[in-house]
Amino acid sequence: MNRTEAERILQSTFNFPHFFDNQWKTIEKLLNGEKVLLIEKTGFGKSLCFQFPALVLQGVTVIFSPLIALMREQVNKLNELGIEARCINYGQTKTENKRILKEAIDGRIKMLYIAPERQENSEWIDAIPKINLAMIVVDEAHCISVWGHDFRPAFKRIIFLVKKIPKNTPVLATTATANKEVESDIAKQIGKKIYVVRGQLLRPNLKLFVINVNSDEEKMIWLGKNIQKLPGFGLLYTGTRVDTDIYCKWFEYLNISSVAYNAGLENETRMKIEKELMDNHWKCIISTNALGMGIDKPDIRFVIHTQVPQSPIHYYQEIGRAGRDGYPAVIILFYNHKKDKELPLSFVEGGRPPMEKYKKVIDCIKSGVNGKIEIIKHVNIKSNQFDVIRNDLIEQKIILEIINKSKKEYMYNKKSKPLNPNYFQEYRDIKFDELYKMLGYINTTESRMKYLCEYLGDNTDYEFNNCDNTSEIKLRLTLLPEWEEKLQNFHESNYPELQFNSKGSKLINGIAASYYGVSRIGNTIHLCKYEKRKEFPDLLLKLTIKAFRYKFSKLDFDLLIYVPPTRSGNIVKDFAEKIAHKLKIPISHNLIKIKYTQQQKNYESMITKRYNVKNAFKYEQVEDIKGKKILLVDDICDSGATIMEIGSLLTKLGAILIAPLTIAKTVGGDVL
């Protein structure tokens, strides 16, 4: 098929008049059964480079993508064009996913989108040999590379599949963000004879700004004063899920239209917000990086980061969502030199667990502990850390993965070579270098877009005039007492919800008076609990009572119970007595600890935190509990494992409702 013939099909099916040169170059190679790595800027039209050949090739094209929102959007568009496409993801029922796999096996669809993580599913493992594969596509291919900005262990499994298929089966890897090192790594993994197509990455319509601040409060004040003045609709990226909630409530307090989005939301809620974004329902979506890459919206007019990304590659990827229609868009990055390096540094540290954890996992498997959950318990690591370690150890052939009655188990390979630590140290060194290159972007006095392009390997001669170092005016914050007071009033009336997945329990969602680590409340708790060892002041009592009345004013409680201490003496007991007195609720001192437990902060995963407190409590007067509504008081809620365990106990004893109330919720807490 030549270009003229192909463009006739393009016009009649996709309603585009012609291909860009790099699009056709890519498509031509794929139609000839070759492997291609396509590196092009966001908005270029990379998806057409696999959708067109998938239409004309015989068989099913499988597209591996980490972006469920993008899957859904592309599948809907293809179906509207009369092209049979489907996607498999965790947001659909097992029955629906099974039906779609059957359609692929029967050859009734042309394109099948699937998340790389689904490769571990037994039904996928059974189905893939039965599918007539026309082509394999690896979207967001930088995720294959440990040197890439968003490495995902599950992408490694795609390579196992690529190596098994016939040599003349075309393979396409696409990304907007690959420097020379990542490019080389992707090419090496996918195959020696891979053709690389690299386009220009410059985006002259993006107006780039950096705003230097001295605190998170200054970020909130600048946004409160100015976000309504920005054109159109946009995205506000934060560092953590809790931050999405804090900024959203701050905007709500100021009557600014916004909504929070993160990976912790239910699938239906995420789909609803994605649709509302497309319909310009909100002034801005406040999100972690869970949103950005999955949204194909041409008219996003601003992208703001409240936290420093881990690398210029991360940053280019996320700001690339703006201005895809070619019109100007505002790009802002806040930077607090005192503390904004802490979060990205922690991500770098967590990207490759310490060597000691690798050794512990090996020793654990050697001893005969061979299931994922059991290994996590023994080693005390997070689930995602285990996934990274497992894939690295399999790649180095130190452990073997076997399927035993649909359960994955791991065995030590006695013939393996010792663990090679140099590989991991090299990874850490590169990631630290990337972070410091991001700080270089912040501190540069030259063109910011040129800095990004050169870092990504695009050494264009284009003269950039689209940032606050060239022709744009510097953005700064002027602090006014009225805004500082407004923000303080907000902090003292913003009550974080304590959410619990409490199936089979009478535990309901609770409330905290504040966030620990955001406002002066957290500092006060820390001083009382860990340094001065004295009772909590009346300020915290008043705020906690206000939070109680905000959440539970319509409930009548029969009993107040407090969480027994692990280390902090009677400080919670004394505080609970004051609350009971103020609210006129009878207090019980009969909940006791019967098992020694470590402080929960010593444990890294929910699995180990639950295990730490399992069967750790006893209630001495059982008859007090049956048929009662109970207010459960603690000082700080972090993971929620302790409250969940106590809720389960009180449910078994006959409580009809248990409502948690705490002074604070940790910013990094992973409450279920």
Image (spheres, rainbow, N blue to C red):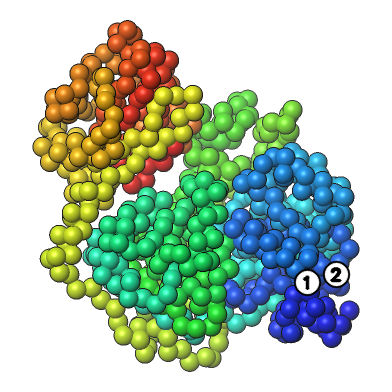
Is there a contact, CB below 8 Å, between mark 1 and mark 2? yes
In depth, the one of 265 and 383 nearer the eye is 265
Q: Is residue 625 above or below residue 155?
A: above
Taking the spot 32% from the left edge, 17% from the top edge, the residue there is 628
* Image quadrant where one finds the N terminus: bottom right
Residue 554, image x, y percentages: 28, 32
Determine whether, in the image, residue 155 is placed left or right of residue 473. right
Query: Does the image show residue 566?
Result: no
- Say which mark, if any, is on residue 56: 2
Taking the spot 33% from the left edge, 35% from the top edge, the residue there is 510
- Say which mark, if any, is on residue 523: none
Residue 162, image x, y percentages: 78, 56
Amino acid tagged 1: Phe
Q: Which residue is mark 1?
A: 52
Residue 401, image x, y percentages: 70, 37
Which of the 4 quarters of the picture holds residue 611?
top left
Which of the 4 quarters of the picture holds residue 219?
bottom left
In depth, the one of 204 and 495 nearer the eye is 495
In depth, the one of 335 and 369 nearer the eye is 335
Determine whether, in the image, residue 282 is placed left or right of residue 492. right
Amino acid tagged 2: Val
Q: Is residue 395 above or below residue 440?
A: above
Please rate how many residues cluster around mark 2, counting C-alpha atoms within 10 Å: few if below 14, some from 14 to 19, many from 20.
some
Q: Is residue 195 above or below residue 356?
A: below
